[in-house]
Image (cartoon, rainbow, N blue to C red):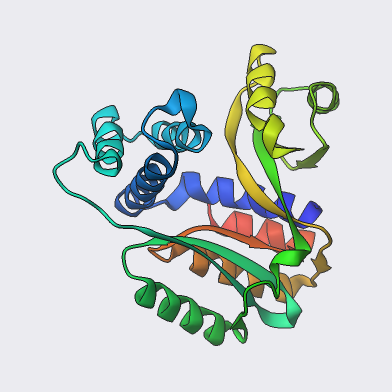
Amino acid sequence: MSGHSKWANIKHRKGRVDASRAKLFTKLARELIVAAKEGGGDPSQNPRLRMAIQKAKDSNMPNERINTNIEKATGKGKDGVQIFESQYEGYGPDGTGFIVNTLTENKNRTISSLRSTFAKSGGNLAESGAVSWQFEEKGLILLDTNETDEENLALDAIDLGAEDVNISESILEVISDISGLEGLKSNLEKKGYTLNSYDIALIPKSSILLDHQKSLKILKLLDILNDLDDVQKVFTNADFEESALNEYANSLS
């Protein structure tokens, strides 16, 4: 799972560096709307909505705007919004597998953007099921390890029910069963740990180790995919060469 851990670290840092607020808020709003439409507008009864609200707050979306988006989904707002949720699978260079989760008002636009992006990278969109069998759906928590005893933090996470723990630079990644995600999050916070994020993610069962140049190529593709307007999440089974990760991370500073 090391490849996923490394990308989660890089993606987290990038999000802090250059996320477009307008684009970010659009993506967060779509997630709020779909989550509320799927499970209702009461976050106490809707785990997906609770996560969406937390993400929005972490990104400094005003409470009024959060509530407005929830109202759109539950029929209380003035403007009804139809958003389609889809999952696409594809292959990048060197046989790397990708899963892309999207939320969009225009599925034709989304498919066209994804097909073009994969083609330009030397890859292609794949049929449903071609890649997804290589991944498992898990809970994912990211924590800072700066000024924290990494070993004790990892042991605490395992004791509290984590399935696996990975450390990458200053980020510790805690993986759990989906049903135990919120309980694990709450218990880590009760122990005084500060969480960067918690979410449901697709974790690769095994990874494809890439050399320096191939790593940079895939990192660039991940960047482009994540930056597409309709894309919410991207997962890959690529495992990156350490020097390429450092070069890429330094380019974000």
Query: Considering only vertical position in the picture, is 93 above or below 167?
Result: below
Rendered image quadrant of residue 33? top left
Q: Residue at x 36, y 32 (%)?
A: 41
Q: In the image, residue 14 lies at what x, y percent?
A: 53, 51
Please state if 78 lies on the left or on the right of 50 as rendered: left
Inspect this view and state whether residue 191 appears. yes
Q: Nearer the viewer, residue 219 or 93?
A: 93
Q: In the image, residue 19 lies at what x, y percent?
A: 41, 51
Please state if 62 lies on the left or on the right of 59 as rendered: left
Q: In the image, residue 122 lies at what x, y percent?
A: 61, 87
Query: Considering only vertical position in the picture, is 197 above or below 27?
Result: above
Q: In the image, residue 34 lies at what x, y percent?
A: 39, 48
Please state if 134 lies on the left or on the right of 90 as rendered: right
Count every numbered label the image shows and give the total. 0
Query: Considering only vertical position in the picture, is 182 above or below 233?
Result: above
Q: Residue at x 82, y 36 (%)?
A: 163
Rendered image quadrant of residue 208? bottom right
Rendered image quadrant of residue 239? bottom right
